[in-house]
Amino acid sequence: MTTLTTETPPAPANIAAATVPADRESSSGIAESTPRSGLVEIAGVHKSYGAHEVLHDITLRIEPGQVVTLLGPSGSGKSTLLRAINHLETIDAGSITIDDEFIGYERRGGRLHELAEKHVLQRRTRVGMVFQNFNLFPHLTALENIIEAPIGLKRATRAQAIERARELLARVGLADRESHYPRQLSGGQQQRVAIARALALDPDVLLFDEPTSALDPELVGEVLSVIRDLAHGGTTLVIVTHEIGFAAEVADHVVFLDAGRIVESGPPEQVLRAPEQARTQEFLDWVI
Ligand SMILES: Nc1ncnc2c1ncn2[C@@H]1O[C@H](COP(=O)(O)OP(=O)(O)OP(=O)(O)O)[C@@H](O)[C@H]1O
Ligand SMILES: [Mg+2]
């Protein structure tokens, strides 16, 4: 087991700027009967590859059920940050917790110790991930792709997993495609199966890394529409996207990264329509 060099992250100066406001339901006064899960707290995170620092003092608090979009130029660290949230990537300093729990570490004697892979896998199931290139198992049908993890992790019997997979396929508009293999599905359909697969473990947090960027333009809409349906449905969503219009529409909070730093962060109407930083405006001029 390795010990992380930092014990407790320093209180970062930009925490207020990068704090997502309380979610819409609670602020509108609707009482919540059960405590919600899916709080993501990223504090003082640093990550380097050799001498190249790719994440610099990233601090971001994402409330349960919030929708956050990460924007930024190529190489700005978006994927690295996303992957660090579910411990697909280790960090050099700082901390990332989901509902106060580390995915890849446990605190013992005031220090963080990296967990064994099997414990990481268990905890990582709280975080679903959807990749740019779908990452479906090519030798499994749509339905088999979805039931694989719930059965493998003994979360459900085969019959229960199949029932739930059918519900999820219907939810993403693919009820009639359960026996199709990935090669028999369009890119948009494959991505919708990937979303259904990510939902099969009932994650508290769903991460999307450019979910539509590998798709032909005419297939983008069907995938965005599925993500739109998930937004504000209780699951915390963190979405890396270059679809600025979509970000403006669904996000509670937009974070603009450049060279591994949070340059600007706030509600979409501020960051996307009236950015304070010249670098943000420059990026928006380039992508829009
Ligand atoms: N395994 C790795 N080894 C070395 N450098 C890496 C590794 N992974 C990423 N990087 C570097 O870290 C930086 C951030 O990469 P990252 O993939 O997070 O960027 P990104 O914002 O997702 O970019 P894109 O929009 O192109 O996907 C880049 O300079 C990249 O080259
Ligand atoms: Mg990326």
Image (spheres, grey):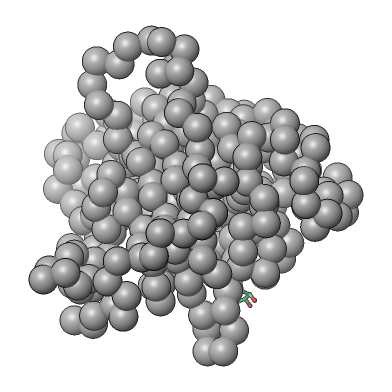
Q: Is residue 25 above or below residue 276?
A: above
In the figure, is residue 223 to the left or right of 235? Answer: right
Residue 121 on image: x %, y %: 25, 61
Residue 108 on image: x %, y %: 12, 68
Q: Nearer the viewer, residue 287 or 32?
A: 32
In the figure, is residue 260 to the left or right of 220? Answer: left
Question: In the displayed image of the protein, which residue is found farthest to the left?
Answer: 109
Q: Residue at x 36, y 65 (%)?
A: 9
Q: Residue at x 25, y 26 (%)?
A: 35
Q: Is residue 152 above or below residue 91?
A: above
Quadrant of the rendered structure where residue 29 is?
top left
In the figure, is residue 74 to the left or right of 102? Answer: right
Residue 103 on image: x %, y %: 28, 59
Q: Quadrant of the N terminus?
A: bottom left
Q: Quadrant of the C terminus?
A: top right
Q: Residue at x 49, y 21 (%)?
A: 24
Q: Residue at x 50, y 32 (%)?
A: 21
In the figure, is residue 277 to the left or right of 231? Answer: right
Q: Nearer the viewer, residue 172 or 78?
A: 78
Q: Nearer the viewer, residue 41 or 34?
A: 41
Quadrant of the rendered structure where residue 262 is?
bottom right
The mark total stands at: 0
